[in-house]
Structures are given as C-alpha cells and as structure tokens.
Image (cartoon, rainbow, N blue to C red):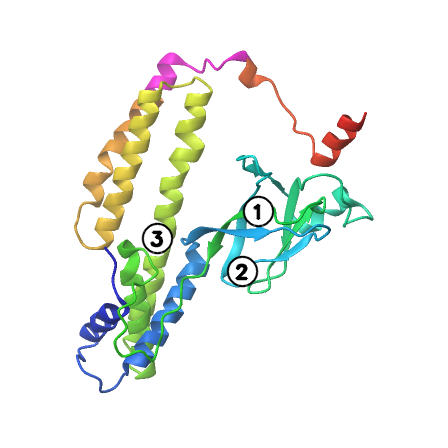
Amino acid sequence: MTLTVNQVVASVRSRLDEVTTATWTDTEIKRWTNEALRDLARRTKHLRDTTTVTTTAGQAEYTVPANVIEVDLVYDAPGDGRQIPLMHQAFQGMNALWGQNMDRSGGDPQVWTQWGTPPLLKLRLYPTPPASSKTVTLYVVRLPASITEDDASNTTALDFPLAWVDLVKDYAEYCALRKDRDQRWKESFDLYNSRVDDMLQVSDYTNQPMEMIADPMVSAGVVPRWLAVWGLVGYAIIFVGMISEIMGSGLGLASSLPGGLWEMFVGGWLIVKGFNAPASAAEPTTTALPSEQASLSAA
C-alpha cells in the first residue's frame, strides 16, 4: 500500500484545517513535500537501491547517477555469473595502493573509492579496467523521486516508506505554519525532528542484533541457532511495536517483552554454558591488500 501525492496534500490540508485553497496553495504543499523527502533521505539514508556502471577500457573514473547520496558496496561482474566484491578504500588512503601510478592497469579492478559530493560524486576503480562493456553493480543510498509540483491531478505514489509518511506531513505542516507566522510552527518543527530521531533509533536498534549479536554467536558456536532466531524475531517485534507506538497504538511496552526475555535468557545461557568457541575462531587472520596479493601471485 502506498499514498499518492494528492492524498498527502489532502492530509496536510486537513491538519491545517483548510480543505480548499485559501492561505496555502497545493503547489506550495507539494514543494514542501519534496523538501521533506530530500531532507529525510539525506538524514536517515533509508532509500537503498542498486545501480550499474559500464566500464570502458583504460578508464578508471566514472560519474555516479546524480540521485545517489553515497555508495556502500561495489561488485564486479566478470561475465561468468559471479558477483565479485571489491574492497573499499577511502580516497585519502589510496596513495598507499597506487603510489605514483593511479591509472595503473593490470587485471580486473580490486579496489573502489569515491570522491566529490552529490550530485557530482565520482567512482574510481583500481586497477583501471582493462576491458569495455563490463557491468559493475553499485549498492547505493539514493534520493527519492521528486514529485511534480504543478500537476493538479497528481496520483503518483510517494517514494517513501508508508510507515514513516507522517514525517513528510509534519514537515509540510511546519513549513505552512512558519509561512503564516503562526507560533505553532516551533511545536511542529520539534515534533518533526523528534520523529526523525525515532526513525534513526529504530533502524539502528533493529540492525544491531542481526549483524552484531545473533549471527556472530551462531558462527562461533556460542549459542544454538534456535536461540539466535528467537532474538531476531524478538527484535523484529520490537521494531513493529515502536512504529505502532509512534502512531499512537500504545503497544510499545508489550512488544518489547519477547526481546527482553531473550536478553535475560541468553545472559543466563552464557553464564551456565560459558564461551566454548572453536579453537580456529580464536586464531587471528589477516587479509592481504589486493596489491600484496598481486605481488605474491607474481612471486
């Protein structure tokens, strides 16, 4: 289910107690909606997508699409069905790899870096691709699609998660009240920022158990898989509960019970069972940089 632009405009007008145009035009509300979408995308980085770049032989630098805020991952497709992850390196640290020859060619790219700022963000591959027409896949954070502000019958679906669409309305309401010099704009502005913080906390809170707690514990043999699944399900329920709490359901506390019980149980489990990770897990490992790997292969 999605909301159309006109539905959002009607909802904002309902909040402002102005069903038909008087103080604020539809075009203004749509412009504020566009501002809200861009602000939320930049602050929360919730719109994640993929895009591709086609390589050109001897060309190391490529322009990223203008709607991309940042690049998270890059995969090279050698043409045999595989997707090979490239190692990321900050642009300031690339001198350690390419030295005085930043355009060196010598096999398929192994490292990627980015520089510049949107909408002029650049992707650079190293070594320089030796072949043309190869596809490089980018996992990115992007801006939402802009809505047409002067279309009176705009039925375009809003490019935004439905669970958080109230934030878009909050922003538009704040802008309308500020334009009218209504002192309630400060309250509306504070509400908007508070809900943005809630959105960020929910995203961080629900990502942490999956990536930093449950999965490494299973991989190291510290806890059984069923216990890890319990934790993941418990935190998923917390996620849903926090969203419903923001919408006024009052289920926030009840939804935290499965995750809270898991935390107490897993703590007791570790005290009783102890940490019994395999010996191989304790052995430190190192990963050679691509340039080091190339040197070893040549030797």
Residue in the image at 62% along x and 21% along y: 284
Tell me whether circle 3 and circle 2 mark residues in contact (CB < 8 Å): no
> Disc 1 marks which residue?
135
Left or right: where 128 falls relative to 299 = left
> Mark 2 or mark 1: which comes first in sequence?
2
Residue in the image at 53% along x and 48% along y: 138
Tell me whether circle 2 and circle 1 mark residues in contact (CB < 8 Å): no
Q: Can you give x and y, in whole percent of width and height, for residue 210 in the image?
A: 39, 34
Left or right: where 160 falls relative to 60 = left
Q: Can you give x and y, in whole percent of width and height, for residue 149 in the image?
A: 35, 77
Assess disc 1: are there few (<14), some (14-19) or many (≥20) residues with their C-alpha within 10 Å of its C-alpha. some
The tally of labels here is 3
The tag on residue 65 is 2
The tag on residue 199 is 3
Under mark 2, the amino acid is Pro
Residue in the image at 25% along x and 62% along y: 3
* Region rendered in magenta: 268-279
Gap between marks 3 and 2 measured at Cα = 26 Å
**For residue 65, above or below residue 57:** below
Q: Secondary structure at mark 3?
A: helix
